[in-house]
Image (cartoon, rainbow, N blue to C red):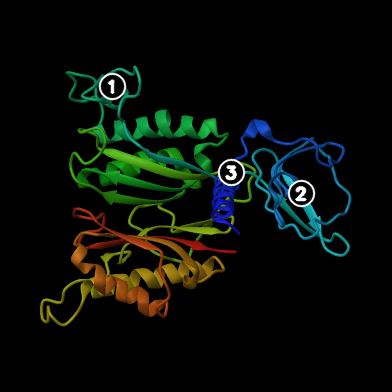
Amino acid sequence: MTKLDDHVHARDEVERWKHDGVRVIPGDQLDPNVPSTPGMDRKAAINFARAGAQKLWAGTVTIKPNAKTGAHHHGHLESIIYVVRGRARMRWGDRLQFTAEANPGDFIFIPGVTSMAADDEPQRNGIATAALMPEGMQWGGQPIKLETEFLITKRIAPSLELAGARLEDVLHAQIYLADPEDYSAFAEVWTRHFGKSQPTWSVIPCIEHGLAPYHGKIEINVLAAKPGSAAQKRPIDAGVATAFQDQPQAVKAGDLLFISGLMALDRDGLVPQAGVDPRQPWFSSPPEAQAQFIIDNIARLCEAAGTSLANVVRVQQFHTDIREFYPVYKVWERQLSGRALPFSAVEVPSPLPVPGATLLVEAWVYAP
């Protein structure tokens, strides 16, 4: 081979790599010339003819209501089906005795909403006036109650409605409050709106002026289930004490268990072993004792839901002193025999909703 041949070969290789290394198929360039079933319109993006794929077919399939295929197999192809709209039922097995339904995502997530004025909403200092007491009035309502009412009725409920859901479909919520004096008043409004169909929820303190609107008092994010999906909520009761009246211990939805933010408390408040013994203040570890009590309660809730602590998929820890992280981590390590734990730890201002508590733990668990 001459040097010229080498140069031509190298140039051809670069061109092949340039054009075939990554293939992008725009949505308006799908190939409709593929086998289809009556009632089903298939268009190919990736297959052997278009991209040289050996074990992959990718494209779109639009299925008319009640359309069906006969029994068939996909040969050597490995298949992934992503449902955008509607519901698809699949049967398989020697006698097609097994079935499964694929739907669009079962969950709706609404990221943190605040009272910040949107678009042309009337506002004062960046906050929607509908969330505030009327100017010049001293008895126009308690500020946190007005702001909570605004978020639930004017932010969360309309957002859920856009996805076809209602407040009763909410599974879990996180509430960030800038003033610990507002804990009780917030809970009063929240309970009035959710009643007996309450989701799990956690109240987390944040610094004053720490929210998007400088003078805002509260931020809420929620996770809800789509109506008709498999993720319908069922309360779980294991006799675990929660910080607020009517606050659920846990809710199971689909294959997930959501647990309200827990602290080391019983019906009388902070459990004795979680405090400092003044007779021997250096002979105990309050954060470790709190963690052990909380994690034991999480394990009880897991058992009541038919799962186990080993199936924890998300943990958020809120510490009033991040220096207490390590003893808490060591408890998790002992409980889970050193297996990896998907968690985050955040330092928050004190006090937590339970006097004397320095740790709040929220967990999600896989519950098949």
Residue 182 sits in which quadrant? top left
Q: Residue at x 58, y 34 (%)?
A: 164
Write down the residue under mark 3.
19
Could you say whether the residue bearing mark 1 is in a helix, strand or loop? Answer: helix
Q: Nearer the viewer, mark 3 or mark 2?
A: 3
Could you say whether the residue bearing mark 3 is in a helix, strand or loop? Answer: helix
Q: Residue 268, percent across and down?
A: 28, 64
Q: Is residue 344 left or right of residue 312?
A: left
Q: Residue 297, percent across and down?
A: 40, 69
From what the image shows, is residue 262 above or below residue 29? below
Q: Which mark is residue 129?
A: 1
Viewport quadrant of the N terminus? bottom right
Q: CA distance from mark 3 to mark 2?
A: 38 Å
Q: Is residue 250 left or right of residue 71?
A: left
From what the image shows, is residue 284 above or below residue 182? below
From what the image shows, is residue 100 above or below residue 193? below
Write down the residue under mark 2.
89
Q: Residue at x 43, y 44 (%)?
A: 222
